[in-house]
Amino acid sequence: MEEKKFDLNSIIGFALIFGIIVWMFYLNQPTPEEIAAEKAKKEQVTSEKKTDKQTTTDFVTENTAIAVNPLDSVALSNAKTQLGAFAYSASLPSAKNEYTKIENEVLSLKINNRGGYISEALLKNFKTYDSVPVYLIKDGKNASFNINFGTTDNRILNTQDLFFEPTVTKNGDNTIVSMKLKVSEAKFLEYRYEMKPNDYMVDFTIRSQGLQQVINSSQKINLDWKLQGIRHAKSAAYENRYTEIKYEYDGGKDDYVGAGEFADDEEQNVSWIAFNQHFFTSILLTDTPFKTTSFTSKNIAGNTELDDKDIKVTREFSASIPLELQGGEINYAMDWYYGPTDYKIVNAYDRNLDEIVPLGWGIFGIINRYLFIPFFGFLSGFLPYGIAIVVMTIIVRIVLSPVTYKSYLSQAKMKVLRPEINEINEKYKDNAMKKQQETMALYGKAGVNPMSGCLPALMQIPVFYALFNFFPSAFQLRQKSFLWADDLSSYDTIAELPFTIPFYGDHISLFPILASIAIFIYMTMTTGQTMQTQQPGMPNMKFIMYLSPVMMLFFFNNYASGLSLYYFISNLITIGIMLVIKNVIIDEDKIHAKIQENKKKPKKQGKFQTKMKELMEQAEQQKGKKK
């Protein structure tokens, strides 16, 4: 009996979709250049692996800040030797490691006297996967904010080592904290914070007063901001996949720093910088764009031998920003955002911050912004989140059902023509060009387009890829349960493994298994519809039929269970639609009769078909002459 295989035209749609999946995972992997760059920049030695517990790095230098008793003349003299004019700040009562705390309904900040920067940022309404409060900065150990500058008396100073004097005031319902690094009561460098009620955005200003004769304008003034991303999700590896630096430049363009083990970048006219941690982010915005900014991103979680469960931090970010003087003074109006990467929240600021949410590029992002986000928001407004996913999937598949019908109808027509195609293949098996001519002539007479089976699949790719980006980035799904999944934004677990399977993980997720089974059934049904003889040199499509569900199973075992739930329901509905089309809507006898009727009608060929036919006939004639 003749061995049966897939028809390439009938499965090309699925192949394209599967290729998109592989392509997306390929893009998430570090490039050889990124790996090489990391190896070139590494200075750590293997002895650093002696610790069995990952800890955050304290970015603030120890034992370098100077605080003196103003009555101690010797200490004050030593301070002046080291700090020059800024020795005055070391003699104030604020010259000790204390902090000022400000908070509203959603955000709590601690601002340290030493360095004047935010040493703790707590999001009050969220918990981590293990029910710990969500800190973006904790105890000042995983972040630093420092201005490095030279003085006119030839000193190089760092604000993180100096003491600021705090003042707390009110502006209506807003709380204002002024941190001043003083040369005198009238001369200072000020960090000014203004917190509004129920808001994640904090107004922030850096300005100096009376320091024209203190700051050396001929030397570079550099602002360095560093942060290590504290782990918040159940899977550090999955969270790390979406943890990266994003920034806006040139008045509205946005970009990101690569996700390799070590990546760096440099850009001009930067208006905001986001140290993005998947579902939470720290953003520095400026009204006066930074003319030049250098970024680095170091993969901490992916560069450790620790088990995923023991990882405490994901990536280490840094931004180096040269500041410019205006009339001999520093003056920058900025903002801090410490909060969730919730599309609805960040988009409301109208600062292009929605770009930090990974919704996909081009048309895919547009579909998510203007279709799926509002539609899902509407459904989840009155339905549980898991049910909302199911309902949205059903509606999407119903809307796309005409496309499915077109694809299946094309497959049915090809099935009817298969005996005649096989006859042509056998008759002209030694003449590939003649075989192609006769096959095209048959398609023309029957009114069948062999490409019509893959075109509908191409139409579905934008929806497929948009949803692939939507579910992992949907903040609403975070820590929302459905059936056995306790968090739709993370993988579901029905069993823990005592070992780790490469590329699969140390657990078993049920939704990916169900989705893979549904995909296999769908492909089996497609095989039954489009079986034909395997063409020489063509890939073994039956092997792909078995391989694809297995690869999907491995890919999605660590992905958001909401995404796997969507694929499972989507394939179930597709199977149902195909059964209805096959058994109720499509009548193969009628299709056969219609094709035979089309063959009898004179078929007017288009210019392109006529030209192709002429070229093939010419090629056939030349081939005959050579013989």
Image: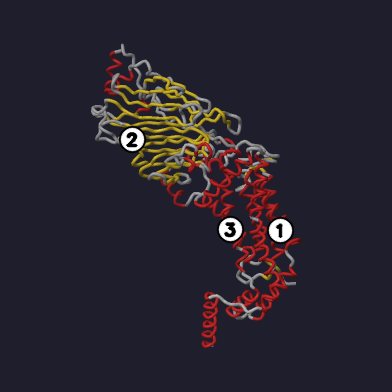
Residue type at the position of mark 2: Asn
As rendered, which of 288 and 543 lies closer to the eye?
288
CA neighbours of label 1 inside 10 A, class few (<14), some (14 to 19), many (20+):
many
Q: Quadrant of the N terminus?
A: bottom right
Left or right: 534 as drawn, with respect to 226: right
Q: Is 572 rendered above or below residue 378? A: below
Q: Is 434 rendered above or below residue 265? A: below
Q: Nearer the viewer, mark 1 or mark 2?
A: 1
Q: Would you say the residues marked 2 and 3 are in contact, meaning their CB atoms lie under 8 Å apart? A: no
Residue 83: give x, y in percent of width and height: 29, 24
Residue 464: give x, y in percent of width and height: 59, 52
Which residue in the structure is indicated by mark 2? 222
Report the residue that reaches farthest toward the top: 71
Secondary structure under badge 3?
helix
Q: Would you say the residues marked 3 and 1 are in contact, meaning their CB atoms lie under 8 Å apart? A: no
Tell me which residue sits at (40%, 45%) in the image: 265
Secondary structure under badge 2?
strand
Residue type at the position of mark 3: Met
Q: Could one spot residue 621 in this view of the protein? A: yes
Mark carried by residue 253: none
What is the distance, in whole Å, between disc 1 and disc 2 at their CAs?
A: 63 Å
Tell me which residue sits at (58%, 56%) in the image: 461
As rendered, which of 373 and 493 lies closer to the eye?
373
Which residue in the structure is indicated by mark 3? 459
Left or right: 55 as drawn, with respect to 438: left
Q: Looking at the image, is mark 1 or mark 2 earlier in the sequence?
A: 2
Q: Is 36 rendered above or below residue 306? A: below
Residue type at the position of mark 1: Met
Which residue in the structure is indicated by mark 1? 578
What is the distance, in whole Å, between disc 2 and disc 3 at their CAs?
A: 50 Å
Q: Quadrant of the C terminus?
A: bottom right
